[in-house]
Image: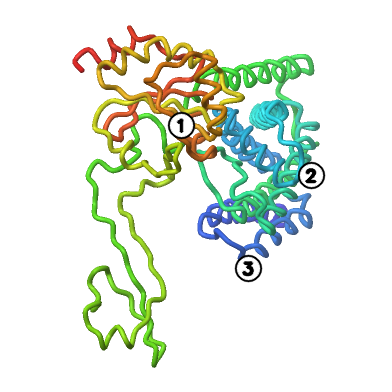
Amino acid sequence: MKLKTMKSIMGWVIILLTIFSAVLIYFFQQFNILFLALLLFEIILVIRYRKIFSPLMIRVSQILIGLLFLFSGFSKAVDPLGTAYRIGDYLTAYHMKNDFGITIFLSFVLNTAELLLGGLLLLNIKPKITPWLVALMMGIFTLTTWYDAIYSPVPDCGCFGDAVIMTNWQTYYKNLAINVFVLIVIFGRLKIKSFFGNIIEWGIALLLAVIFVGFQYSNYIDLPMLDFRPYKIGNRIYPEYLMPVKTYLTYRNKNTGETKEYLSPNYPFDDQEWIDTWEFVDMRVEDPNKMDGINLAIIDLDGEDITQTIVQNPDYQFFIVAWDIESADLGAFDKINQWSVAAEEIGIRLIVLTSSEEKLINDLIDERNLTDAFEFYNSDDIELKTMIRANPGLMLIKNGLIINKWHNNKIPDWKTLSRDYFLNH
């Protein structure tokens, strides 16, 4: 009896230690040999004492993995296009063909698989088969994130979409912690009995798969129902009240090697003796107006940066975001073209942001007979993809505030826009 109690205590200690380690991941953003050793030690403990885990411990592990898989799958399935972009980054990093058809297909497959396995674990469906499928997926994830942590082919794996951003080392640590629970479930799978009969289990699995695919599709043909990015509705692309930008200059004493940093222009530039003794080394700029996650640069077709002129416009303006004109839904341009003159007549600018070259821009204008209301500018394609999950997407902005966003499948007509936003313009 005493031995059984000791085994039970040890099993719970391993589970609680792993949960505690998972919390600690927040504090270990880069490589740490001691923390890595702790996670590997927990895996070794589970393998060594694999027979001590009771059905309750195994069920708890099932639930923990299931909830994590559901959250991870949901955070990506709510934005399948964003997941496709991340997969494309991986294909490019591994020198493989980065085709949109392939990446969006893999996005749907990956997200559905993760959601489905999470649901099966949570509902204890197919408890003898599901753990092996989870182990296979986690094996692939662990090897991939180990490579990411060592070589950093991509800056962020996107394991939780844009909902939770982790470093590559944190992602690897996270997968090691998950593997502890996966091993507990694998070793104890024969101790867990199904809640339902075989036919009902397959029926539930099929139903879940259909629901998860449908959920992704609804987020693919329209904007994500949850937006975790910095350009979501209600956010600002520049501060409401601008603060002065600070420039710091670093100088070094030619004789002693001492360095000093000065806040410009508060340095003795009019002292000839000082000028003869000190030499310029470096400069850094602190811009308190920079918004987290927003790196928008708007360049006119002559190569001039006009970002501030546009984003600080106090009036209503539309951003038509087409990161790639060649693959854009040109029908959406036709819909906007129908009311472009009406918008221009009341002083509302139509700013088209694209990464495409000028020839493609001119071809678009000629092919779709776009009015002169459209103003074309260049911007980084990655930033444009971040701004809105559509090509093109439409954004309404006023005084730096994002008022609303529309997918290319949901471009509103002028009557609707006038009624909702411009009646008192």
Q: Nearer the viewer, residue 406 or 374?
A: 374
Q: Residues within 10 Å of mark 3 (few under 14, many from 20)?
A: few
Q: Nearer the viewer, residue 349 or 237?
A: 349
Q: Between tags 2 and 3, which lies in front?
A: 3
Determine the CA span between mark 3 and mark 1.
47 Å
Above or below 284: residue 216 = above
Q: Give amino acid for label 3.
A: Leu
Pick out the residue farthest to the left: 424
Q: Nearer the viewer, residue 286 or 206?
A: 286
Tell me where residue 28 appears, x and y as whole percent.
Answer: 55, 60
Tell me where residue 177 appears, x and y as whole percent.
Answer: 65, 51
166 with respect to 112 (left or right) = left
Q: Give amino acid for label 1.
A: Leu
Residue at horizontal 73%, vertical 46%? 184
Q: Residues within 10 Å of mark 1 (few under 14, many from 20)?
A: many
Q: Give amino acid for label 2.
A: Phe
82 with respect to 238 (left or right) = right
Q: Which residue is mark 3?
A: 34
351 with respect to 20 (left or right) = left
Residue 120 lies in quadrant: top right
Of the residues under marks 2 and 3, which one precedes in the sequence? 3
Q: Which residue is mark 2?
A: 187
